[in-house]
Amino acid sequence: MSKPFNFRGSINDSAKEHIFYYAEVLDITDDAGAGRIKARIKLVDDVYKTDAELPWSYPLIPRFFNVVPKKGEGVRLFLYNISNNPSGTLNRSYIGPILGQDQDLPYQDKRIALGTQSDIGGANAKKAIRLVDWEVGIYPDPQDVAIQGRDNADIILTSAKIDLRAGKFVPGNPVELNRSNPSRIQLNLVNNKESVANIIADKINLISYTGQPAITFNNLSKAGLDSSGTLLQSFLGGNGELTQDNLPVGGVLHPLVYGDKLIDFCKLVQKFVQNHTHPYGQMVPDVATDESDGIKKISQFNFSEMISHRIRIN
């Protein structure tokens, strides 16, 4: 790796002739909460003896996007008026972090990242997973527009589809596609005619603030909405306990009914109402020996098969 991390790439560059510089992030603690950082440009910032003396660097991208680099990562710093202000104390903006490849989104050391994202150390460029050991579907294709999180979530926009995903790769292994239980919301326009929305996950909760029962934001917040952990799932859907009839119990949400199964049961009831007979008034009905009235199927109907144990509503 070439040494001059602060320059644009050429070893013979002068430190005070550039529009932007490569810098190392040293501190991201901002008491104003504005996304400011302290980053040091090698040689240019030698005038600052301590990191605390470094001037603030402000985000170049608007606050609509929250992207703050981590300590130790690299950024590109823009100095607005270097000729009249050689020390670069006035108006610095940054864009970053500099990350080489998709598999390095959680963190990448500045110098390693520059091997791929600049002409410094270009010979040491790190290849994308898709060019080495790639499983199709983990990361966006070059023609996609995407917003990727630091770890295991992203939003991908293609020609007529939006994918919102969490758990796209096997936790702890960013090169292996999660084929077991990724969570996904997919909005699709099929053949430019029919719109389709798919929600895919182990458990799906459809919650209304004005449903039955009504659930407030405070209820959800106290149950751990932001963490979406076991406490929240227990609050919404119970602990997985079942009655003797294998019906779920607990939780504030109701199991969703399978429409086709409900219709099957209603048809059995309808058949019994139409075909049963009474020996005379107010006596219990006769039970047909040939099952023509469907009473046996009604008595043996498995209600557990009528409801979803994984999709709940209020």
Image: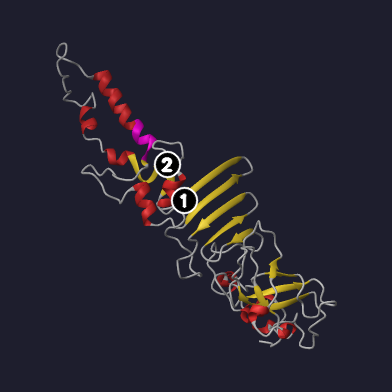
Q: Is residue 102 visible?
A: yes
**Secondary structure of residue under mark 2:** loop
Query: Which range of residues does the magenta coloring cover?
Result: 255-263
Q: Label 1 crowding class (10 Å Cα cut-off): few <14, some 14-19, many 20+?
A: some
Q: Amino acid at mark 2?
A: Ile
Q: Which mark is residue 200?
A: 1
**Secondary structure of residue under mark 1:** strand
- How is this picture coloured? secondary structure
- Residue 216 position, x and y percent, is 44, 43
Give residue 264's quadrant in the image.
top left
Q: Quadrant of the N terminus?
A: bottom right
Residue visible at 20% across and 16% down in the picture: 277
- Residue position marked by numbered label 2 in the rendering: 215
- Seen from the viewer's position, the closer of residues 109 and 273 is 109
Q: Label 2 crowding class (10 Å Cα cut-off): few <14, some 14-19, many 20+?
A: some
Mark 2–mark 1 Cα distance, whole angstroms, equals: 23 Å
- Seen from the viewer's position, the closer of residues 4 and 71 is 71
Give residue 252's quadrant in the image.
top left
Is 258 magenta? The answer is: yes
- Residue 300 position, x and y percent, is 21, 35
Report whether 162 appears left or right of 305. right
